[in-house]
Image: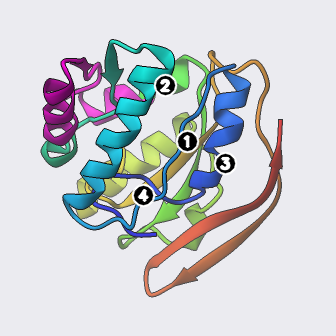
Amino acid sequence: KESYMFHTPNIKFTKLQAKSMDLPLLTKITEGKKESELNDLKILIQTAVSKYNIEGVVTGALSSVYQATRVQKICSQLGLWCFNPIWQMDQVKLLNELNENKFQTLIVGVFAYPLDESYLGKEITKDMIDKLIELDKKYKINPAGEGGELETFVINSPMFKKKIIIKKSEIEYKNNSGILSIKEATL
């Protein structure tokens, strides 16, 4: 449930994201222990190399040096290239580009004041981006959640052949922290 490397809220529904993009999905259980979870990732990447003959890894690392350097190190050890296309990109610019390119993304985790349960399940629209910018100015949060303030889940994108429909969800919230737990979803 906790991890230094991986986004965990609603992770079991990545299978729907992969299915919507017609991509294979490899998974592996990890205990989320710092550094040892990297060995689990390395094993999974080795499996992808042998099963799919991959030549590299593309990350979504934006500003986490911890995450970016760990994936780069694994790729280097395995002789793979590592591409970080959004590395050090301005967070607001990234959010706007995702919105302009028709990504439909929901906030599924909030972990810092002033983000409360009212944000859970909300789509990151232009209005929400403006709201996150204001919160950044007032409270110094990272608008894209790069400080761990929030987590997201993509329900539609230009790469999806079908949108993910959340049929049932539940909010779990206490002490300025919570998640929108997806219970049932379909394409």
Location of residue 158 with respect to 67 vertically, above or below? above
Q: Which residue appears at 50% of the width and 22% of the height?
A: 51
Residue 28 in percent (x, y) is at: 49, 50
Packing grade of label 4 (10 A; few <14, some 14-19, many >=20) is many
Mark 2 and mark 4 in contact? Answer it, CB < 8 Å.
no
Residue at left 30%, top 57%?
37
Q: Is residue 17 left or right of residue 161?
A: left
Which residue is under mark 1?
124
126 or 112: which is nearer to us? 112
Q: Residues within 10 Å of mark 3 (few under 14, many from 20)?
A: some
Q: Which residue is identified by label 2?
A: 98
Is residue 93 left or right of 65 when viewed as pictured? right
Disc 1 or disc 3, which is closer to the eye?
3
**Real-space Cα separation, disc 2 to disc 4, in angstroms:** 16 Å
Looking at the rendering, which quadrant does residue 19 occupy? top right
Q: Is residue 122 left or right of residue 96?
A: right
The colouring scheme, among rainbow, by chain, secondary structure or one colour, is: rainbow
Q: Does the CB distance between marks 2 and 1 fall below 8 Å?
A: yes
Question: Distance from label 4 to label 1 (Cα)?
Answer: 12 Å
Residue hosting label 4? 150
Which stretch is magenta? 68-95
In percent of width and height, residue 167 lies at 86, 54
Amino acid identity at mark 3? Phe
Which mark is drawn over residue 13? 3
